[in-house]
Amino acid sequence: MDFIYALVIVAILVTAVLIKYRNRNIRVEWILVSFLIGILSLPIGLYLAQIIGANQIFSIILIFIILSICYTYLKKESPAFFIKILIVSFLISLIVFVSWFEIGAYYEHQAGAVISVNQYDTARGEYVDITKYMEEYPLLNKAIKGEGCEKFGEKKWHCKSPPSDEWRRSVDFISKQNARLYKIGEKYYELSFGIS
């Protein structure tokens, strides 16, 4: 979400600069248009790809070309102007796209993986006994024991850890069991996984 705010601030600053220098007979409106084409092409292209089931990159490039042609035609400019608009808008879009994924990767790394555990003394319906597999999954074993977890009463807790291969292995293992309750030792557990 911070990325969206930063993008809006940059758009406002670019617009302010363009308004300031517009009075000096410097033709910079094409930079603003390139900026807008670059930013608008991403969401429109991704939406178009989702609707028609096309390749996302193809859809984004198609939107680049269509918007650049429309602006060039409306301004009655030369093909060289079209190429200039297309290149600048592509570079802006590339910067936004790469920044988006870098920020997403940063936040994913900062986010915590959560294992929620509810403990029961008796079985409440069908269950799967996974006691013999617990040594293979140390993160899951630690969560079942409640080590380093945030407790919500005696029989309910959440365990946070950074997303890791071990966490993903535990999620895959539990998903393959396809059960609501798991027997470990003499207790029964309800397990759920998430990202906070």
Image (cartoon, grey):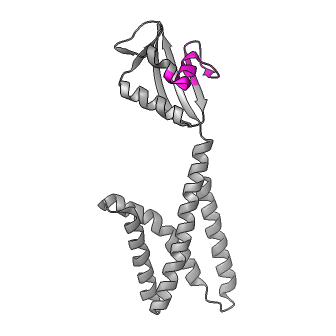
Residue 138 placement (x, y as % from top left): 55, 23
Residue stretch in magenta: 136-158
Of residues 16 and 90, the one nearer the viewer is 90
Instruction: Please say whether residue 46 is one of the residues in the magenta stretch.
Output: no
Q: In which quarter of the image is residue 48?
A: bottom left
Q: Which residue is drawn at 64% across and 80% down?
A: 18
29 vs 186, left or right, is right
- Image quarter where the C terminus lies is top right
Q: In which quarter of the image is residue 56?
A: bottom left
> Going by the picture, which residue comes out furthest to the left?
52
Residue 67 placement (x, y as % from top left): 43, 77
| Figure check: 159 above or below 93 | above
> Going by the picture, which residue comes out furthest to the front?
136
Q: Residue at x 54, y 56 (%)?
A: 101
Residue 45 placement (x, y as % from top left): 41, 65
| Figure check: 110 above or below 188 | below
Instruction: Please say whether residue 142 is one of the residues in the magenta stretch.
Output: yes
Q: Residue at x 45, y 86 (%)?
A: 72
Of residues 128 and 23, the one nearer the viewer is 128
| Figure check: 163 above or below 185 | below
Residue 9 placement (x, y as % from top left): 65, 64
Of residues 81 and 67, the one nearer the viewer is 81
Q: Residue at x 62, y 22 (%)?
A: 149
130 vs 126, left or right, is right
